Amino acid sequence: MLKLIPASQNDVPMIRSLYERAFPANERRPLRPLLDDTTGHSRVLAAHDNESFCGFVCILEWSDIVHIIYFAVEENLRGHGLGSEILQAVHEANLHKRVIVDIEEPDSSVPNNKERIKRKAFYMHNGYAETDIRYNWRRTDYVILSHGGNMTDEEFGQFWDALSVAMPGSEDY
């Protein structure tokens, strides 16, 4: 049975290891500020299936927006619906909120385009819709996908403006 719970100190080494394997170096930021946040605007959640660690989700929150900034499932557990279960748990815990995620924009000229297409299909299969929001961060183009309602570019900017005041350092994510 899947449980999505606040990460404990016992989860941190497993989260860190999966984080480093799942995300390229140019996309990684220090996890400690998210784990130690006392503002209430970030959460690091560990996913456990039958008491075994299977993945994690890092979230930033403001108003009615829940932004998934990092999400990964252990490599040997992928492709069995566990990622969809984790997303469903995030959605159920955030009813009446918009849940957004940024993904690398599919681009036939990049080596990981198949992964990008697969990632987009995964989120679309789980009820996300593409927004008009696009941006470039660290020389990579991203698009925002949204679940539970659309988001405008202006709202996305307001989210980051408000969060950077409430949670100094969050603009680095």
Image: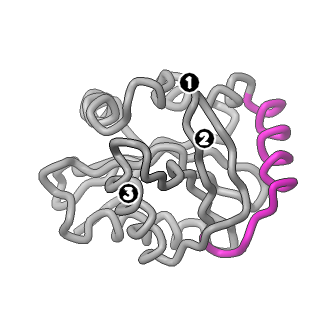
Residue in the foreground of this view, choosing between 48 and 154: 154
Task: Name the colouring of the figure.
Answer: one colour
* Sequence order check, earlier mark of 3 and 2: 3
What is the three-letter code of the residue carrying label 1? Pro
* Image position of 36 with respect to 128: above or below: above
In magenta, the rendered stretch is 147-167
SS assignment at label 3 = strand
SS assignment at label 2 = strand
From the image, tell me which residue sits under label 3: 4
Q: Main secondary structure of the magenta part?
A: helix
Identify the residue at horizontal 18%, vertical 48% (top origin): 75
What is the three-letter code of the residue carrying label 3? Leu
Residue in the foreground of this view, choosing between 23 and 16: 23
Whether 161 is among the magenta residues is: yes
From the image, tell me which residue sits under label 2: 42
What is the three-letter code of the residue carrying label 2? Ser
Pointer 2 local density, CA inside 10 Å: few below 14, some 14–19, many at least 20: many
- Residue 103, label in figure: none
Identify the residue at horizontal 37%, vertical 35% (top origin): 23
Q: Is residue 169 left or right of residue 77?
A: right
Location of the C terminus (image quadrant): top right
From the image, tell me which residue sits under label 1: 33
Location of the N terminus (image quadrant): bottom left
Identify the residue at horizontal 61%, vertical 54% (top origin): 143
Residue 78 picture quarter: bottom left
